[in-house]
Image (cartoon, rainbow, N blue to C red):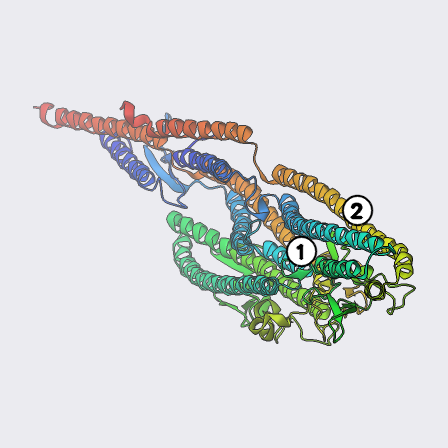
Amino acid sequence: MSGLFGTLNNATKGLNVQQSALQTTSHNISNANTVGYSRQKVTMVADNPYTLGGIGQLGTGVRISSIDRIVDPYVNKQLRNENSSLEMYSKKSEVLGQLEGIFNEPSTTGLNNNLSKVFSSWTYLGSNPELATAKTMVAQNSETFTDTLHHMSNQIDSLHEGTVQDIEKNVLDFNAKVEQLDSLNKQIFNMTSQGQAPNDLLDQQDKILSELTGIAGVEASYDKFNRVSVTVAGQPVLTEDSISKMSVAPDTAGQLVVDGKNIDITSGNIKGSQEALTEIDNKKQELNELAYTFATAVNAVHSDGGEGIPFFDLGEGGDYAASIQVNKEILNDVSKINAGKNIKTVVGGDGTRAQAIAALQNTKLEYSANPAEMKYNETTMTIEDHPGGSTVSGAYNDSVTQMGIVKQQSDNMVDSQESLVSLLEARRDSVSGVSINEEVTNTIAYQSAFEANSRIISVVSEMLDTLINRTGV
Amino acid sequence: MRVTDSLMSKSFLRNLSANTENVMKYQNQLSTLKEVSKPSDDPLKVSKILDLNNSIIQNDQYKTTINDAIQWTNVQDSALSSATESMQRIKTLIQYSANGTLSSEDRQANKAEIESEIQGVVDAFNTNFGGRYVFAGKNTTVKPFEVDKNDNGEITGIIYNGTDEGNGNLSREIAPGVSVELNTDGRNFMNEQDGETTDNLGTFFSEVLTALDEDNTEKLSSLLARADQEIENVVSNRSKTGSIFNRLTATLERNDSEKLNLKTMLSENQDIDLAEKYMQYTMESTAYQAALSMGTKILQTSILDYL
């Protein structure tokens, strides 16, 4: 349609389109700091032209072809996956950091120091077997040692418990997020099936999916309506029409279960907790083995191969680090500590047995869940070195070092993963982030376009005035 | 690259947090003066530190043992010195009494003195160090030597109550796997002849006293050689104690130098280089301040300031 009314129509369309663009700009500006928001852009196109026969086409103004969100799906996917790894390593680092705190090394109060003091007091007793105070010192230092072991054992247990609880909380969170995704899927389907792009809903979908992947590494796939399906380790938890709940197996290892099947995830916060749990359990086991081997060796020498009373009471149940105690009989009467070679008739100045126990600090012993029986020699009061074994403090040292290495590795992974994630975030922000400067510049452009369109309307209005009121008679 | 506001503020925050982390690390190291505070800081270093701490405690304990053993040998030495003096006096008195021109009364006077010197010898052998008898073998809590007297109050011999079987020397561990035996076996001083318990220091004394009672100058003369032998025995034991003392002092010196080594190594592993660390800290703190001042200025600026 040509003519003045056509022009008036063009200007009105321009006015409306600039107004819509301004509204989108204001939407962008107000969501500049919204997490997961992707900037939106109004795409304007020239409207279908009007063909004047023999002349050509006459433009009929502007229309909005679409309002798009600017995203790079590939970057989003990468970001999700790398963030999932980052979550895993930082969780692992965090828990291992607590484990490290329990071991409290190097310090002057840690188990290493206690152990040295125990041996040192045996050496002192070896040189001063006549002194009652030397025996008291052995008993007291050994008790400090067992107290420290108990304390560590308890703390490790509660760390284990706390970590499992953490997994349980995360699983609840995971299930809640899957439900949110499900309801989003329905809304998105309603919009897209009507041919509309639900920009803000898709942003929310991305955000929740990213949080979900942070909790436990999931695989996501989309159908043509932009509905997302989620599988965890090959096991579907969300499809277009079904939803499955994740749960934690009742054992204490933090095993995840979906639809009655055990699943092993490969990344995410829960995976970090699971890996830390393995490490926690290892350390607990090593402490138990250390307590068992140390106490058995001291007992063997102290009781002369089972003849006399044992020095330590290991307790029942295999949780030795928690149950080990200095023999009650000895605590009540320290004179029952055998310092001399002959354990039946006490020879005042004979400290050879105490010296032999002190010499255990240089004996290489075996630490395992099922250790071979120690070979005790009654004449020399020594225990045979175990091939490939290590000293008590050496074994503890190994355990601490190994924990340090695992923690260091996972710290390093956190560092490198953090820089990778920040790089990807930078890419994402670069593509999808809102730039205030840009939006304000656009605002100026839309404002001036709006003003210009208004001017056209007033010009057309004046022209119509001229035409109607001033022409003719 | 399209730079957006969130990109800038995030990267600012990230850099700032990295800076803060470094500043905190140096602050921590500077205020504890320790290079590492937890195993993951440097697992191998921590492993070395644990080992060294162990060795230092062990070394300390050995030092205590060595010092105790040195005191022990000192006490033994002074006891033996006084025993030797008494023995020599006894010998002089025997020599004097062997003189045929001496009257019986004079001999009896000598006998009285000899008796008291015998008591002196036994007292010296019974020397006690911090509640422990130094020549009692392993029976350190039992008085080892006792003068045996008959009903008339005459000395008939010396009874030894110390360890009478096996090794009577106390052993002390003075370094890992290294032991020294203190010369504590009292049987050495009984000086049993040909392994017979019937002829020892006690019987020698008894013989001397009997000969004095009998005015048997020939016997006394013949006992002079035996007196020399007994003195020789004590002296040789004294020199043995002396050689143990020397060995102990040498070990003490080694122990001290080892301790110095261990402490140096520990310090190398554990302590910070203050100057270097402070320089690093200053650099980090400068970077931190720069990041703060730069970031806050840039982030505040936008196109709105110019509209």
Residue furthest left as drawn: A473
Comparing A304 with A173, the one in front is A304
Asked whether residue B161 is in view, the answer is no
The Cα–Cα distance between marks 2 and 1, rounded to whole angstroms, is: 35 Å
Left or right of A143 on screen, residue A180: left
Q: Is residue A71 left or right of residue A356?
A: left
Q: Secondary structure at mark 2?
A: helix
Q: Which mark is residue B243?
A: 2
Question: Observer-nearest residue: B37 or B211?
Answer: B211
Look at the image and tell me in which quarter the N terminus of chain A lies.
top left
Disc 1 secondary structure class: helix
Q: Tell me, for residue A393, which label it has, or none.
A: 1
Q: Amino acid at mark 1?
A: Ser
Identify the chain of the residue marked 2, using the numbered disc in the image. B
Q: Is residue A185 visible?
A: yes
Image coordinates for residue B63, horizontal then vertical, percent: 67, 48
Q: Quadrant of the C terminus of chain A?
A: top left
What residue type is disc 2 on?
Answer: Ser
Residue contact between numbered discs 2 and 1, judged by CB atoms under 8 Å: no
Q: Closest to the observer: A470 or A138?
A: A138
Dot 1: within a 10 Å radius of its alpha carbon, few (fewer than 14), some, or many (20 or more) residues? many
Quarter of the rendering containing residue A46: top left
Q: Nearer the viewer, residue B70 or A195?
A: B70
For this view, does A355 lie left or right of residue B195?
A: left
Q: Are marks 2 and 1 on the same chain?
A: no
How many marks the image carries: the answer is 2
Q: Position of residue A319 (x, y in %)?
A: 60, 70
Characterize the local packing of mark 2: few (<14), some (14-19) or many (20 or more) Cα atoms within 10 angstroms: few
Residue at 72%, 60% in the rendered image: B116
Tell me where residue A469 appears, x and y as whole percent.
9, 26
Q: Percent from the top left, x then y, of residue A201?
A: 39, 51
Residue A225 higher or lower than A366, as above or below: above
